Image: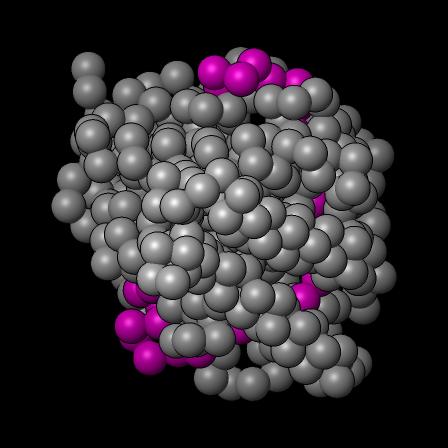
Amino acid sequence: MLRTLLPFIAILPALSYSLFSLFCARRFFRNSRLCSSQSASPAVTILKPVKGMDADSYDNFASFCSQKYSGEVQLVFAAASPDDAIIPIIRQLIDDFTHHDITLIINPALHGPNYKVSNLINAFPQVKHDIIIVCDSDVSVEPNYLQSVTSHFADPQTGLVASLYRTSDVHGIATALEATGFTTEMIPNVLIARQFEGLTFALGASMAVRRNALEAIGGFEALAGYLADDYQLGNKVYRAGWHIALDSSFVESVISPESLMAVLSRQLRWARTMRVSRPGGYLASGFTLPFPAALLASLLAPSPVVGVTAVALLYGVRLSVSLFFSRRFVRDGLFPTWLWLLPLRDMLAFFTWALSFLGNCVDWRGSRFVLKSGGEIEELV
């Protein structure tokens, strides 16, 4: 009897985690709808550090100029080189939206190994308003984005608002592997972390921070030595005594066609960054991964029938929960089209988790860095 139960015991952590993520998602989105209300529209400054072209760059930028928002909006682009290919796109945006407050800052000054944060530091003197939103250059937003995000600042204890992100348009298997990971791993993990301990970190696609909270942690300068500036910004704001809110509206991470190797390299960079940023939680996450659970269940099964039954149970639940996430909560349109890719995605997640412990070097935007304890980085020459 025990030998028969062992495969089902092996899948229990992953199975329970998957079901609990569904509970957390239903609770979060239900409460968000109940609490949603119109509020004041504070003046905001949107900071966009840029380097190079992204897919649909102009449309991504224009989405921030097409907001249904009554408050003042300042948009500041920060680049390091006047020869950057993105500069003509930004200038075209300024010409097309003449009634908007849009500024382009070009400054090559470096303040640490994180070039993105250096751009933010260089642009900060131009910031006019007390609500500051940092958004990645490859992000597109819905017209109600600003109203939804800024509504959380009605609570004076809210220092930062993070936004969930998704990718709805993929270009083949390589980018689908990454995009499905947002739906089946990143978003469930964030919602479970929020349920257990509250949000203690931010998500880099969109971070809205109160000026007072940013000043309390030493400004953007406090992030210049880290690779995971999003995690560090949120964690430092949290440890300074502020509340971090999670907005229920999604921003769209627009991706370009990429090779499988490029996607795998980025996945490994993210994994190693998370390992050094949240070592305890990251180590524990390995016990909830579906692929090693399915593999262990197969090895422990006293017969092929029992092994197949255990794995079928795990992936029956896993596929159903992922489909529900995609269709009901994330609404990314990826599933059921890419549902067959989920076992491969789970295998990739396990191997990147394991490989993250075998080194500390990462590649980022054409440069190579070594990760140090706590998440600080040093560029390798």
Q: Which image quadrant is residue 371 in?
A: top left
Residue found at the very far left of the displayed protein: 373
Pinpoint residue 226: horizontal percent, then vertical percent: 28, 43
Point 20% across, 20% down: residue = 380
Quick check: can you spot residue 121?
A: no
Is residue 13 shown in magenta?
A: no
Residue 96 location (% of width, % of height): 84, 34
Name above or below for residue 40 compared with residue 357: below
Place residue 23 in its image quadrant. Answer: bottom right
Q: Position of residue 367 (x, y in %)?
A: 33, 19
Q: What number of labels is visible?
A: 0
Identity of the residue drawn at 45% across and 42% down: 303
Question: Which stretch did the figure color magenta?
Answer: 235-262
Q: Nearer the viewer, residue 16 or 114?
A: 16
**Would you identify the image quadrant in which residue 120 lies?**
top left
Residue 27 in sight in this render:
yes
Q: In the image, what residue occupies the spot 27% across and 52% down?
A: 283
76 vs 193: above or below? above
Residue situated in front as seen by the camera: 105 or 316: 316
Residue 327 image point, x, y percent: 79, 54
Q: Nearer the viewer, residue 86 or 270?
A: 270
Quadrant in which the C terminus is drawn: top left
Residue at 38% from the left image edge and 26% from the top image edge: 364
* Residue 239 lies in the magenta stretch: yes
**Relative depth, front residue between 134 and 19:** 19
User: From the viewer's perspective, is residue 193 above or below residue 369?
Assistant: below
